[in-house]
Amino acid sequence: MSITDNIELILPFKAEYVSIARLTASGIANRIGFDIETIEDIKVAIAEVCNKILSIGSKTAQNYSIIFKLSQEGLVVEFVCSDKSLKCIFGDENDALGVSIITALMDNIEFCTKNDYILSMSKALEGNN
Amino acid sequence: MSITDNIELILPFKAEYVSIARLTASGIANRIGFDIETIEDIKVAIAEVCNKILSIGSKTAQNYSIIFKLSQEGLVVEFVCSDKSLKCIFGDENDALGVSIITALMDNIEFCTKNDYILSMSKALEGNN
Amino acid sequence: MSSELNFREEQLGTAMKIYISGEVDIYTSQSLKSRLYDVVDSKQMDLIIDCRDLNYIDSTGLGIFVGTLKKAKQFDKKIYLLNLKDNIKKLFIITGLDKVFVIE
Amino acid sequence: MSSELNFREEQLGTAMKIYISGEVDIYTSQSLKSRLYDVVDSKQMDLIIDCRDLNYIDSTGLGIFVGTLKKAKQFDKKIYLLNLKDNIKKLFIITGLDKVFVIE
Ligand SMILES: Nc1ncnc2c1ncn2[C@@H]1O[C@H](COP(=O)(O)OP(=O)(O)O)[C@@H](O)[C@H]1O
Ligand SMILES: Nc1ncnc2c1ncn2[C@@H]1O[C@H](COP(=O)(O)OP(=O)(O)O)[C@@H](O)[C@H]1O
């Protein structure tokens, strides 16, 4: 059984901080041991989710949270917000580009979930299972 | 009056994640508009505090938090942990190097505080007040 | 605030060449949009976008390229994308936009 | 796990030259400590540490340099630090360690 370490980044609902999410994601993916191309992929996918969360916005929440779950198997990324109206955030026609990018770059994505998080996605460390 | 945005990074008590703190700190300092040398200074000072928190460790807490408060005036960084025994963390003779580094690189440091955080330090955006 | 996206333009005969450098993301994309739309509207020429120093682009930026292309087509003009880095070319392929633009 | 700290050694007459590259922090510092202590103990020579590719060091790493120097002095040997980058030289000056080491 593999130990999981959680790292959490909490960001304001502002476009200027998505670059912080990208940078932190790169560092974490590098720390786990992903190769450079996969680090870039994870970074891009995370930014796409941040973009969408920001484009919807929230009437009640000031910030949202990215939880990185690191293990020997790889990385799981969960997006969380106190505003529970943020669910199934992808779906309208303008999302086609973002969705195709996320889907191509990550292994598994839970777009619509009954769990507490907005969205969850994962990348395995060895191979593309 | 200046708006303050908070960014929070929550890290496990593990040495391998201090590099994530450094990277996130660099991105935030860059976003605020600090020059390259000051970005490096902030990064180094933050890592020194993380090192000390890790070297003490905690019997009750799994992780600690770095809160970055961004404004037009500059950056305030607070270190927070649910383990309230983490107070006045610097002081023994082995801390001389770390303390001299932090003190030289940051503008103001609250080493021992009655507030909820372990330690707070700040860097002003314009000039070294 | 450090500037993460920069432009440089030069006229090449009947085409406009634009160098984009830095990162196009949700934060910087508005300046890309106004710059590209502006050039298409005011010049009404073919557009050559040189991406040799473009390090990052997201779906917001790709959408702006698409929007620019639609505008250019109104004037019967083309858009050429030059020197895409591998990570960026990958996004064009993933999204199928490699078939929409002339990528060289 | 990517490797953030690397070493390369070469013998120069009666001195050992060590190239340190990457980042010395609380996580990587144990490998620096065992490497430097090992070289001092086994070779008992002057130590030339070339830091041209050392990008980062923290107080943990500085402390290891100090510890290595103490060891070296037991054998009456010196430590020379070469090609410190500005950000690292700054830390030696701040901590007063620029007066303890021979920095060239
Ligand atoms: N997945 C997609 N495939 C093709 N075109 C897309 C896709 N997503 C967005 N677009 C197009 O990209 C363009 C983005 O334009 P936008 O930057 O929003 O400015 P505007 O809509 O004001 O022209 C729109 O024309 C939109 O139809
Ligand atoms: N502020 C300081 N000034 C001078 N020497 C210091 C300072 N802080 C730590 N040191 C010294 O740096 C060395 C660090 O050694 P260390 O890596 O902990 O290994 P060890 O103590 O096992 O030799 C110690 O000899 C310690 O006395």
Image (spheres, coloured by chain):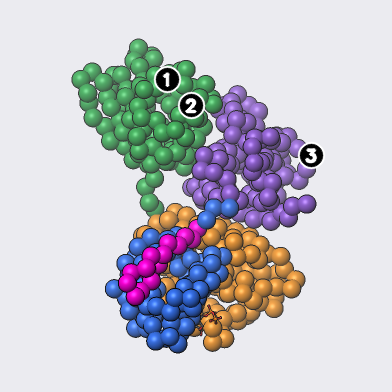
Chain colours: A purple, B orange, C green, D blue
Residue at figure coordinates x 65%, y 66% from the top left: B13
Q: CA distance from mark 3 to mark 2?
A: 33 Å
Q: Nearer the viewer, residue A125 or C58?
A: A125
> Type of residue at label 3?
Lys
- Looking at the rendering, the stretch of residues picked out in magenta corresponds to D4-18
Please give the chain letter of the residue carrying mark 1: C
Q: Where is residue B28? Give x, y as percent.
A: 48, 57
> Type of residue at label 2?
Phe
Q: Quickly name the residue at label 1.
A: C101
Q: Is residue D28 magenta?
A: no
Label 2, secondary structure: give it. helix
Q: Disc 2, disc 1: CB below 8 Å? A: yes
* Crowd rating for badge 2 (residues with CA inside 10 Å; few <14, some 14–19, many 20+): many
Q: Quickly name the residue at label 2.
A: C92
Q: CA distance from mark 1 to mark 3?
A: 39 Å
Q: CA distance from mark 2 to mark 1?
A: 9 Å
Residue at figure coordinates x 42%, y 62% from the top left: D8
Q: Is residue D17 magenta?
A: yes
Residue B47 drawn above or below residue C67: below
Q: Quadrant of residue A84?
A: top right
Q: Where is residue A104? Give x, y as percent.
A: 60, 30
Please give the chain letter of the residue carrying mark 3: A
Q: Quadrant of the C terminus of chain A?
A: top right
Magenta stretch, main secondary structure class: strand
Q: Quickly name the residue at label 3.
A: A114
Q: Are the residues flagged by discs 2 and 1 from a single subunit?
A: yes
Label 1, secondary structure: give it. loop
Whether residue D58 can be seen here: yes
